[in-house]
Image: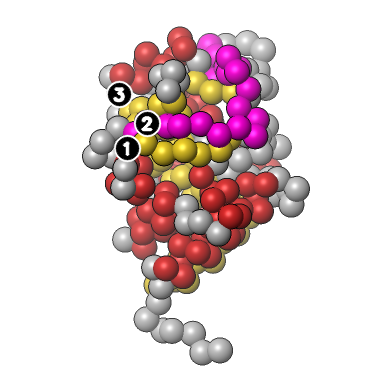
Amino acid sequence: MELDSNKKSLRIALVGDFNPEVIAHQAIPLAIDDAAAVQELTADYDWVATADIKSADSLADYDAIWLVPASPYNNAEGALIAIRYARENSIPFLGTCGGFQHAILEYARNVLGWSDAAHAETDTEGRMVIAPLSCSLVEKSDTIELRANTLIAKAYGRLSIEEGYHCNYGISPAFAAELDEGALRVTGWDEEGEIRAVELVTHPFFVGTLFQHERNALAGRPAPLVHAFLRAAAN
């Protein structure tokens, strides 16, 4: 089949440790393919193992970075390098579930100066910016309220959504207050006011969600944030 030479070709780095049994890993290629087809883009994606990321040079050829679910990662430092590279170089970034958690961790360490910022799933010392959820969200769905006029609200076209999760960790209550003042803003909450989405307002597209919106693709539904992610990469 002859390819349309007018199509924009994108390279997407799927940073994480691929496991065909992880539901989100099954869904992500479908979500990207759907968004690319609708937008008449060619989107090639590579699974980039965290162990293979020793420096930002590993990611220099990509138009966008998605830090995918299924943590703890084999090499958390590789995940943090990817986040920092995207954040500092205006590369479109999407983090879901574990990607959301590590985006918070990277911001705490490298922007807020919390060198001892820690993740309770893997760390025993330091200030826990990621802590166990009061109630597990493994294979559960919830309603999320979105902040108006944000990337995520514009992607969905509404201020209330329902999405699914597979996680036991989120932003600690002690750290949540730190997000009121800086550039990383809370843009989604559950009905109890727990943080479920964030955006970096100084960045063209830097979005993290605790929920796994990519799973919509498994049911043949569009994943609005993936569409927005590809649009940002194309621009």
Any magenta on residue 178?
Answer: no
Say which residue appears at 41% left-offset and 73% top-offset.
40
At 24% across and 39% down in the image, what residue appears?
A: 149
Tell me the distance, in whole angstroms, between the alpha carbons under discs 2 and 3.
21 Å
Q: Quadrant of the N terminus?
A: bottom right
Residue annotated with mark 3 = 182
Above or below for 229 versus 50: below
The spot of residue 114 in percent (x, y) is 45, 17
Could you say whether the residue bearing mark 3 is in a helix, strand or loop?
A: loop
N-term-proximal mark, 2 vs 3: 2
User: Which label was assigned to residue 234?
Assistant: none
Q: Are marks 2 and 1 in contact (CB under 8 Å)?
A: yes
Residue 137 falls inside the magenta stretch: yes
Q: Which residues are magenta?
A: 127-146
Give whichever of discs 3 and 1 has the lower sequence position: 1
SS of the residue at dot 2?
strand
Amino acid at circle 3: Gly
Residue position marked by numbered label 2 in the rendering:
145
* Visible residue check, residue 134: yes
Q: Which mark is residue 159?
A: 1
Q: For the point 55% across and 59% down, which residue is it? A: 220
Residue 221: x, y in percent? 51, 56
- Amino acid at pointer 2: Glu
Question: Which residue is rendered at x = 36% and y = 63% of the image?
Answer: 234
User: Which residue sits furthest bottom?
Assistant: 2
Q: Is residue 39 above or below residue 185?
A: below
